Amino acid sequence: MRDFSEKLNSLPKSFGVYLMLDESRQIIYVGKAKNLRNRIKQYFNASTSKTQKTLQLVDKIDDFRYILTSSELEALILENNLIKEHQPKYNILLKDDKTYPYIKIDLKSDFPALEITRHLKKDGCKYFGPYMVGISATAVLELLQSAFSVRNCKGNFRTLKNRRECLNYHIDRCPAPCVGKITADDYKTRIKKVISFLNGDDRELKEVLELKMKNASDNLDFELALTYRDSLETLNKISRKQMINFPNNLNIDTFAFATNGLVGVINYLVLRGGKVLGSENYLVNEAGNLQDILSNYIVQFYEINPIIASEIVLPEQLAFAKELKSYLESKKGSKVDIIAPKAGLKFALMKMASDNATEHLQNSLAKIVSKDTLTRVASEKLAEALDIKTPLRRLECYDISNISGTDKVASMVVFINGSPYNKMYRRFKIKTVVGIDDFACMKEVIKRRTAQLNSEDNSFSDIPDLIVIDGGKGQLSSAYDIIKDLNINIIGLAKREEEVFVPNRSDPIILTKNSPELSLLQRIRDEAHRFAITYHRTLRLDRQTKSNLLNIEGIGKTKARALLTHFKRLENIINATPEDIQKVDGFGKNIAKVVYEYFEDERQELRGLK
């Protein structure tokens, strides 16, 4: 490790963000500090206590940089932005798809439906949740329908009018507002009861279910009575999960942390309306102290799951608690308290979350270490087999997809530290190649990709440690012609024998079957193929839709896509009878007849009659 004494002593004592770099100039860690000199010095001070993971980080540091900010809040936000942009190896980086189910109620509607969604919007609707491991959103929805009989049908309510009441009306699970069986005022009374339960008051729901069960039994409808009994048992299960009786006005998000110094677990526990809705564990394999890890996690978590509780409970107060509070309040639009309780009910809640984190860490430790080791070994062994001296942190793989030279596309997938990073995936329409020529297609794609090495889009500006081409010598040669002066490592992976080709070498490298390094290459190659095929199918479907179906009177994009989704192929639509076409959603007798008659000539051609 280099001697940083002189550089450390010249550091400012103001707040800002620092970036740790390895010997290949890659950013491997981003942190924030109220005092940059004191904070950065701690990494290189032998007397400062460090976790094993932080020691691994320090061993990799070849240089560091810093950015001064105008405030501590700006440092908090800049740190998060830099982590997302550079995906440093030793920082937490949450996936964008890590969302949870919520129950959504649109109070702007006269007859709101209950809906389960993972997509939260600022649309004036009420969202209740999140529901995770412990309590199912579907089970809660079933419970509410059973007790209060409110609709859960999708779509605009106006489009449902003038239909006959559906089965749900006849089994007392919907009051059929679509055919005028209930007034808007009476329906809203039911919705108020639903909201009361979702806010933590389950007394009326229990009374309603018990009364419905008794009435069904009195009327000798024992099957219906059993349904209400099952709903009561579900309610009792939810109640039994509450090990502590919290006031029903409490809405708290709790974050706890457990670690063995190398790996750790963050437990997120949700309390809404005094009820524990569940908890989730997140495996942590990052460097930094507890405060850095928790603050990074919380900021990223609420970007993906934007409903913020009025109170956040932590195991200890954070150095950036004031700035985190300000940041979250600006997102929530109302007050957020961040506390580290030492006693009482909230301390009991924290202990529950801590116990969950500790248990999950103990149960998962072997798996965590195994996965980390496998990924590291795979990258190291691949670099060794290819005689590459630098770490293989960022891998990119490219694949071409077309049928008979039409709708030619290419995919670019990115793996960071051995795992797919979907946010950086890119796809290309081939622009310059006529007919079937995969070599020319690959050449065009690599040329377009490398032309953007100075782009502001870090999907392209980050230089790959290795490019993998799906194909053999020909595809590799085409791509290598473009990058041979750029000092970027490149290989081709031929699918049939899984041979690895490298530039300027005639014979392939044969990797051991089922080895970690070959498995890594196969995973990224298969992902590139999947991504390319998906894009190709989308384009082909769109082309077929535009060139054929959109010419039919009364058929727009929505109906055209519904036809293709139902029949899969254009040929199947051509051969379909009017009765077959009427089975497609949105197609009545008249429009089905129009579609059928439009394809009369094509049917005769297919039958050889013309």
Image: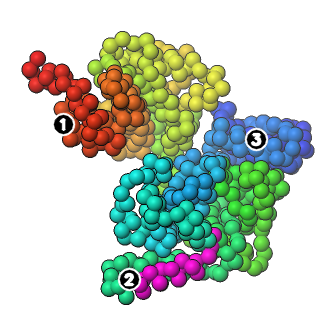
Q: Nearer the viewer, mark 2 or mark 3?
A: 2
Callout 1–callout 3 Cβ contact below 8 Å: no
Relative vertical location of residue 106 with respect to residue 68 in this rendering, above or below: below
Report the Cα–Cα distance between label 2 and label 3.
61 Å
Report the Cα–Cα distance between label 2 and label 1.
46 Å
The magenta span reads 199-215
Question: Which one is in front, 333 or 539?
Answer: 333
Quadrant occupied by the N terminus: top right
Give the amino acid at mark 3. Leu
Q: Which residue is mark 1?
A: 577
Relative vertical location of residue 23 with respect to residue 256 in this rendering, above or below: above
- Magenta span main SS: helix
Q: Is residue 335 left or right of residue 224?
A: right
Q: Is residue 290 left or right of residue 413?
A: right
Give the amino acid at mark 2. Ala
Q: Is residue 590 left or right of residue 21?
A: left
Describe the element under mark 3 as helix, strand or loop: helix
N-term-proximal mark, 2 vs 1: 2
Q: Which mark is residue 240?
A: none
Q: Is residue 286 left or right of residue 566?
A: right
Position in image of residue 548 (x %, y %): 31, 23
Image point (39%, 66%), residue name? 169
Q: Which residue is mark 2?
A: 216
Question: Taking the image as drawn, is residue 371 in sight?
Answer: yes
Q: Which mark is residue 78?
A: 3
23 drawn magenta:
no
